[in-house]
Amino acid sequence: MKTLAVATNTFREARRDRVQWILLFYAIIVIAGAWVLSPLALGEAYRVTRDLGLAALSLVGVVLIALVGGGLVQKEIDRKTVFTILAKPIRRSEFLFGKFLGLMGMVTAVFCGMVVFLSLVLFLREGGVEPAVLVAAGFTYGELVILTAVVVTFSCFVSPILSGVFTLAVFGLGHFSADLLRFAEQSTAPIVAPAARVIYMLLPHLDRFNLRAEAAYGVVPDPVATAAALGYAVLYSASLLAVAVGILSRREFR
Amino acid sequence: MPSRLSLLPKEMDMNALTLMNLSKVYRDSWGRKVVALRDVTLQVKRGEIFGLLGPNGAGKSTAFKIVLGLIHPSSGSGVMFDRPLGSLDGRRRLGFLPENPYFYDYLTPQEFLNTCADLAGMRRAERRRAVPEVLERVGLDPGEKRRLRKFSKGMVQRVGLAQAIIHDPELMILDEPMSGLDPAGRALFRDVILDLKARGKTVLFASHILPDVEAICDRVGIIADGRLRRVGTVGDMVSNDAGGFEVEVAGVPETLIQSWEAEGILHHRGERVLVAAGSQHDLETRVQQVFRSGGALLGVNRRQATLEDVFLSELSESKTQGAA
């Protein structure tokens, strides 16, 4: 109940902060991108639209998470609202989960808006929306869940700007985590290889959630792969939030 | 002051809050130790209004934050209604107004108070009744539709008081509740605090505004440099603290008047000069100075000390001890 109160509060604040404008930004990317790139696509215009639409879902989503989520906890500390909230009979873990759920609610609302818009554009261009596109969008959502947990964790101990920048960095590196593993396997240096393996283990494997190529050709992943990706997103986010609770519980609010 | 061992369970039961040898040491960004609180022992009795007086940086807010569990003490301990400081059970019975409160920009007062009521564990029916009631009690319109970012400092302060009392807590901790309020707001806050006391609640508050403290507090604690220097009723403090004397003289040379002015003890200059003497010894010194300079002693009056005199004298003593 208390977690829900914090979540509602967070969602309401974010919504009134005019984050819905990000939807317009997304619409401009998709429409302008499809309009500019389609003539160059040599008959593959619908694939370009799908690819661009799905890529923009992920990019706009992570920018939104970095912008809004960066200051999620730290701003409460800087503005001292945390004194008022944590003086109430609420556990720090409830407060943190509430912040996570509130941000997730906002991300979900904007994400649904973007998916509806993408579906509308695809419907108008292709006369329908293939299930593979919606499955790929679902995988992108899984990626955004992980990144929301990442930003919430960072926001517990670094400034809003750094939280946002670190989250964007994790997003970038997370998409190259497989390359990092290959690098570790090929490296013969005594420290570099284990260090690269550790970083690989710690980074989220976001390339698992990139099904844009499959969606472009209408390929739907098998249920086992889908379940594995879903399980990974849940486990990774839960582990990260557990770390965040540990950090927040030890933190002093001077 | 009683030590931890000398506090009997029955005595603790009578207290809303007990702090025992509480100390807090921070490390600044250079790694140097900063002592924010030194061995503070304090009991706030149930049903009383206790005022904590101290200059900025004296340790008042640090003490409050330890009580709330926002920071952890370096040593010492305490209980709030027989529960450890900062515990969930303790916080259920507590209302807190932070210094210079700042709330969520985009919420209306009703939305914010509903959230606070939710966090305090109030049921929906209770909340619906309490939110407009408490808004009215702090002098705000229960139908107010503006968001908090459009509120003046005084109005935000009122919302702060409303969120602290909405769940009808047994202990209120108010950090500088009167700051930023106009005279009408201060009078309203005083009334609310006195009303809380009348309903058997305990109020612990920090303030710089001494007349307010003098007017409503049952007991006062003076804290300086992290140390609780005195605790007592205002009456006791004032009567125990002789206000010293005021010496009325005439015909003293300008150089002597200037030296008194430099010492900060000159009360009035003109044809007749008024100079303060804090103690019997000071009085003798002034009289000797007057006679030696060829001036005339017109009279000596005993001064009644005020809470401000006591407060300033404690601060000055604290500074002297710190320098030593």
Image (cartoon, grey):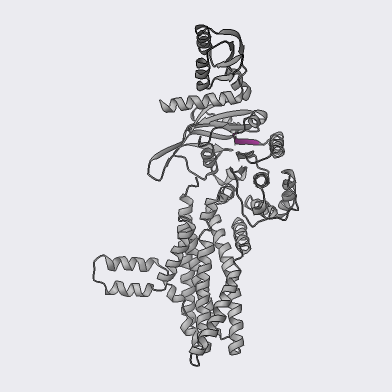
- Is A129 above or below relative to B273? below
Q: Between residue B227 and residue B250, name the one nearer to us.
A: B250
The residue lying at 52 percent from left, 45 percent from top is B70
Q: Residue furthest bottom?
A: A43
The C terminus of chain B: image quadrant: top left
Can residue B105 be seen here? The reply is yes
Magenta-colored segment: predominant secondary structure? strand
Q: How many marks?
A: 0
- Is B222 above or below relative to B65? above
Q: Is residue B121 magenta?
A: no
Q: Is residue A198 left or right of residue B115?
A: left
Q: Position of residue B10 (x, y in %)?
A: 58, 30
Q: Position of residue B183 (x, y in %)?
A: 70, 37
Q: Position of residue A212 (x, y in %)?
A: 48, 81
Q: Position of residue B283 (x, y in %)?
A: 53, 11
What stretch of residues is rendered in magenta? Answer: B202-208
